[in-house]
Image (cartoon, coloured by chain):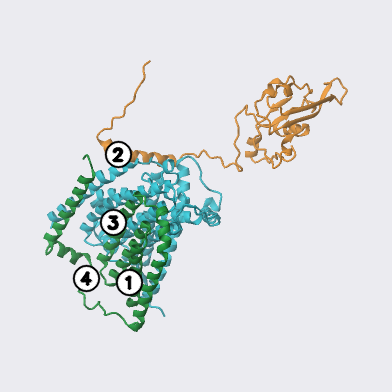
Chain colours: A orange, B green, C cyan
Amino acid sequence: MATVVRTYEPGYWDKFYLPAIARGLLLTLVRMFRRKDTIPYPDIKYVPADGYRGLHRLNKDEDGRIKCVACEMCQTACPAHCIDIVPEPAPWDDGGEERHPAKFEIDLLKCIFCGFCELACPKDAIELTEIYDYASFSRDDLIIDREGLLKVYDITSMGNIYERQNRGESIQIDTGNL
Amino acid sequence: MTSILFYMFASLLIGSSLFVVLNRNPIYSVVMLVFAFANLAALYFLLEAYFIGILQILVYAGAIMVLFLFVVMLLNVGPDRARPQWAAMDRWWFGGMVGVVGLTLLALVTRGMGPLRSSAADIDDGFGEIAPLATDLFSRYLLPFETAALLLTVALIGTVFLAKRRI
Amino acid sequence: MIPFYIGATLVKVLVVFSATLLMIMAMTLAERRVSAFMQYRLGPNRVGWGGILQPVADGLKFILKEDIIPDKADRPIYLMAPVITMVPALMTMAVIPFGAPLQVGEYMVPLQIADLNIGLLYILALTSVGVYGIVLAGWGSGSKYPLLGGLRSSAQLISYELAMGLSLIGVIMITGGLTFGEIVAYQQETGWNIWKQPLAALIFLIAIFAETNRLPFDMTEAEQELVGGYHTEYSSFKFAMFFMSEYANMITASAFMVSLFFGGWDVPFVDEAALGNLGVGLSVLAFLAKVGFFLFLYIWVRWTFPRFRYDQLMRLGWKVLLPLALANVFLTGLYLVWKA
């Protein structure tokens, strides 16, 4: 295999270093006026790309009912064992789903955000959202329950939450009571 | 004013010079020698010999003593070996300093704080400036000046020759 | 009633001192902001308006931090070193003329604290004393990295002092005076020295970068090899003193450069004396602008070039700059003889 070896042969003027120094200085000077990559975070929020795997949500169907049927597929698929589901018969009796999660808890400190739960779900009920800036001072607050996951659906179902926040909409991601 | 300054700098000079000799930690000695040079320079300034004074700082304190310090550091005469001696010499240099300062104060008092013989009237115009000095050096004393320069060059080359095995 | 000139001198000392400290503060912020801008970042912009109070916050932090003295440090020398570095750094501003003479009532006040007849040598002497701070800090810390940094710096500073001093000789030869007053006055009459001594200016510029231990010559710090160099073991306010004296040295060096080669407070194409005290204000602004440019250059170069290797540094100093400076002295001498 042929390898290309690039050698540097300084010309006459290069040996004075000054032209190279001037070029270098010019480069940094021009770069000073470039657009900055820094995002001043709390004021303007980083908008993750589509497919970003952040905080989970539990989807609702057209009737506003939880889509989850407590099949525990996600719980089985989860490599981090962070999902805890307790099923119960559905509270409604109108030909809808018969199973229903009585308890659906995700321990966000255990979760590795691999997205396997999303893939395993036969009902497209669990989904990972773009939310990344939830934090809390206590471990208990970072165990998200069924109501919390439904609330996440409510705030994320109308489009990217960070784009909306950057537009000036005030959307609270309540870390204490997800 | 001048005499007070003179006695202050002079006693500091003597005190720090004593420190240089009596103290066994070479680094402290070097630092105190620099301090002594600074005081010497101050004395030159009082004599209105500004150029000599600044050269004292620039050449001796600034360049030569840095090399001294350099050598002392590289020889690694660290504080470990020097510390016990330092403790022993502690009283000596302190006593010496106190003695010198005391003697100076005594001299001050006995002279009734009178001014030193004023030297301002005795000196010529332009004394201590560079131009007259340079004129003398490059005309009247040209030969000694150049001889000294040659001697220094010879010494420098000789040192390099002796120190370097392969040139 | 104190005589007018003593009062004026005291006021000047106060003004120069506080201006230097203010510039140091501004420089610490400017360094961070400019470096950030060159790296597509924003830099500290949240304390105060656009970050201008950041230096105050930094200063407060330095004062409040724990002051650690290493066990193996040599206490007297360890404590003395920051002071030795700081004092000459602040003292050098005394001989720099920063504006045209100010008319106050019937008096003309030269905007310079003291026009010593050995002005240039005064600065050289003080900077050479400043070396001790670094060397003693290195030795007194009782740790190997500071020691290496200190030794490197002493060798470096001595080497570049020679080239710096020799590059000055050309200026002194054409000006015929050692005081800053004469040098600036000469440049006002006949144009800036940069046009007459471009080589000396270049050598001097390189030498002051080395003298102030700034990149690309910051061998004394060289984070990758020496942790922090001579101030590795320093913390709290003692570290701040080293930090401040580095910037103070940069300010002095820039002012030195401006006074020697860029006409000092001279405003090009303007007769300051004819404008009265307005001209004085203009001249002070011109001086500040020129110094500001060189301070910016310091930062600019720092964030553009990599560090020299130690042997390259020494080779540049001894084998390139020193002969060039000597040649410059020789050529200037030839020119003067030819003219006379």
Mark 1 belongs to chain: B
From this viewpoint, is residue A86 visible?
yes
N-terminal-most mark, 3 or 1:
1
Residue at mark 4 to residue at mark 2: CA–CA distance: 46 Å
Residue C303: x and y in percent read: 41, 43
Residue matched to label 3: B64
Q: Which residue is mark 1?
A: B10
Q: Which amino acid type corresponds to the residue marked 1 in the rendered image?
A: Ala
Q: Marks 3 and 4, Cα distance to the nearest angstrom?
A: 26 Å
Figure check: A78 above or below C96: above
Please tell me in which quadrant of the rendered image residue B4 appears: bottom left
Q: Nearer the viewer, mark 2 or mark 3?
A: 3
Query: Residue flagged by tag 3: what amino acid is it?
Result: Ile
How far apart are the two marked residues, 2 and 3, measured between alpha carbons? 33 Å
Q: Secondary structure at mark 3?
A: helix
Task: For the residues labelled 4 and 1, say whether their Cβ atoms are less than 8 Å apart.
Answer: no
Q: Secondary structure at mark 4?
A: loop
**Residue marked by disc 4:** B127
Q: Amino acid at mark 2?
A: Tyr
Of labels 4 and 1, earlier in sequence is 1
- What chain letter is assigned to the residue under label 4? B
Q: Residues within 10 Å of mark 4 (few under 14, many from 20)?
A: some
* Residue where numbered disc 2 is placed: A17
Position of the N terminus of chain C by quadrant = bottom left
- Tell me where residue A103 appears, x and y as whole percent: 80, 29
